[in-house]
Image (cartoon, rainbow, N blue to C red):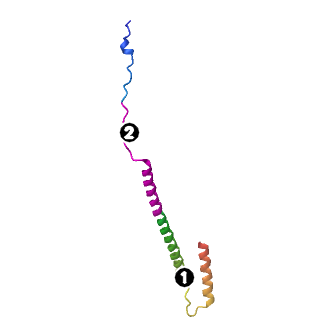
Amino acid sequence: MKKANKRAGAAKPAQRRPAQKKLATTPARPQNAQRAAGLAEVVAQLAVSAEKLAQAADRLAEATARLLVTAQALHEPLEMPGQSTTDSITWQKESEAEAIDGE
């Protein structure tokens, strides 16, 4: 049997590195203030965009209403000479009923 080598079994203590100096950083509060200011600006822009979008939606609704009136006016029959008014009233009621059924 071989004799155990005392040196091989002994563990060396780990060498400690000197503590590293922390780098000088800017304080957290100014960064947070800058972020808050940037966020406030983005929120303000978002509010302006939302208002513009609401105005555009209103204009679209008005244009749609005008278009509907125009389309209804185009679909009204013109009274022709020799056509009775009862025929035109009957036709209007039928077209209104079709419009309601189509919705």
The quarter of the rendered structure image containing the C terminus is: bottom right
Where 13 sits versus 81, above or below?
above
Query: What residue span does the magenta drawing correspond to?
Result: 18-45
| Res. 35 image quadrant | bottom left
Residue at left 47%, top 66%?
A: 48
In the image shown, does 45 or 91 lie closer to the viewer? 45
Q: Is 61 placed left or right of 5 in the picture?
A: right
In primary-sequence order, the first of circles 1 and 2 is 2
Q: Main secondary structure of the magenta part?
A: helix
Using the image, tell me which numbered label, if any, was put on residue 50.
none
Residue at left 37%, top 7%?
A: 3
In the image shown, does 8 or 1 lie closer to the viewer? 8
Does the magenta run of residues contain 22? yes
Residue 8: x, y in percent? 36, 15
Q: Is 63 placed left or right of 13 in the picture?
A: right
Q: Are marks 1 and 2 in contact (CB under 8 Å)?
A: no
Instruction: Determine the CA span between mark 1 and mark 2.
Output: 81 Å
Residue at image mark 2: 22
| Res. 25 image quadrant | top left
Q: Secondary structure at mark 2?
A: loop
Query: Which amino acid does the dot numbered 1 rest on?
Result: His
In the image shown, does 6 or 93 lie closer to the viewer? 6
The quarter of the rendered structure image containing the N terminus is: top left
Query: Which amino acid does the dot numbered 2 rest on?
Result: Lys
Residue at image mark 1: 75
Residue at left 60%, top 83%?
A: 92
Residue at left 49%, top 68%?
A: 51
Residue 11: x, y in percent? 39, 18
Q: Secondary structure at mark 1?
A: helix
Where 57 sits versus 78, above or below?
above
In the image shown, does 42 or 21 lie closer to the viewer? 21
Residue 75: x, y in percent? 54, 82
